[in-house]
Image (cartoon, helix red, strand yellow):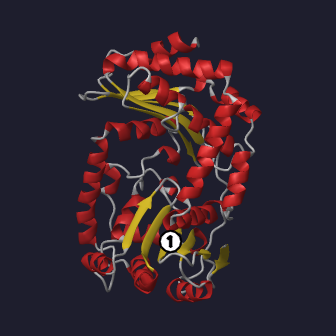
Amino acid sequence: MVEVNVLSNGIKVVLEEIPYVRSISLGIWVKNGSVNESKELNGISHYIEHMLFKGTTKRSAKDIAEEMDAVGGQINAYTTKEYTCYHTRTLDKHFDIAIDIISDMFFNSKFDDEDIRKECNVILEEISMYEDAPEEIVHEMLQEEVWKNYSLGMPILGTKNTIETFNHTILKKYWETHYRTDNITISVTGNFKANEIMGKLETFFGNLKAQSVEEVESETVEYFPSIITKEKDIEQVHLVLSLPAIKREDKRKYTYTVFNTIFGGGMSSELFQKVREENGLTYSIYSYLSQYTGAGTFAIYAGMSPSQTNTVLKLIFEIIDNIRKKGISPDVLAKTKEQIISNFIISNESTVNRMTNNGGSVLLRGKIKTQEETIENIEKVSMKDIENVIEELFDFEKLSIAAVGKVEGIDFKKIIEENINI
């Protein structure tokens, strides 16, 4: 059973007791990511995430690592466009150690200027590593272009120019402004007693002074159809096609999920079977949804030889045209819904996944959607729902393309016009 409580200072706590496991997963969720940054401070949320592992007033970075390793525990963090999450996983008997370490990091990190300078080099290397991975950077290129002029389009890591300006004062001020009680949700899943855990959370997190600001309604982010390319001397062209799609809380999200799975979300999907299996044109091809508070996209990724680019694009458009004209069969819809439901149930057998689902739901939506509700919503998706999504999604006047590789001489605009008759 999942229950949502509140600490004395207003921090929300979501607990799920699972008495038959031996571990506890703990997540500290902060509603702050790159969407909350200005252009001048782009990358600061991710930088702060790094700095919380660099030592506190009573622990060095080495102490943090060694204390968790000594009990076989895991501790990590990640930053997204809309939130940051710090999380641990330990045996239930070691939970006190985990909560002591992560709360110490959370409240007592030094943000030492010498450590900040060192970590700047680490993040610069992370940016360079990312730029050397064309199959990764092509997605970011696309988002920067279609959401230009909006923070949603900015890179999570920041840029080399911005992160080199950060110091103790800037980082600490940003932390104090954005790491507020109304911005924090704690999620705990595993083998524990709720009343005991609430007492421990109150001890370690209840002393943070209650702070809140009036929440500004999220703006709708405008989508700019674009074609952006980057020449790179590599063996493949990495390509992403994109169309605007639904926001995170749109009621049609279950229909979009089902359609995406049918179209390009797995090995049995239309894209994978026809482009890779039947024609051998790519090693990797898939579609995916990106959903945020203010915007969303539906995207298709493919990696191929430069000489096959035109052929692959032509085949993708043929697949889209076929599915628009013929739709899908009731049998495919039924099989896909069962596939999604089965994967969902299996993934929820992990305490980490359940902690993540619970924490993210309360932080971003303010409520928990039960497993039964999610399954029911997937089962409700009808043939008519799928037909409506197909009709509204493939508006090619809004089509965008990003490509990285040996793209010189490839006229993407002409390819689009030849294949979709705009």
Residue at image position (49%, 66%) is 352
Could you classify mark 1 by the number of other residues whose Cα lies within 10 Å: few (under 14), some (14-19), or many (20 or more)?
many
Residue 138 against residue 5 in the figure, above or below: above
Q: Amino acid at mark 1?
A: Ile
Quarter of the figure with residue 383: top right
Residue at image position (53%, 88%) is 200
Secondary structure category for the residue under label 1: strand
**Nearest to the observer: residue 267 or residue 291:** 267
Residue at image position (59%, 34%) is 262
Quarter of the figure with residue 302: top left
> In the shown orientation, is residue 271 left or right of residue 296?
left
**Residue 294 visible in the shown view:** no
**Nearest to the observer: residue 113 or residue 78:** 78
> In the shown orientation, is residue 287 left or right of residue 62?
right
Residue 290: percent from left, percent from top? 54, 43
Q: Quadrant of the N terminus?
A: bottom right
Q: Quadrant of the C terminus?
A: top right
Residue 288: percent from left, percent from top? 52, 39
Check disc 1 and report the residue beneath it.
28
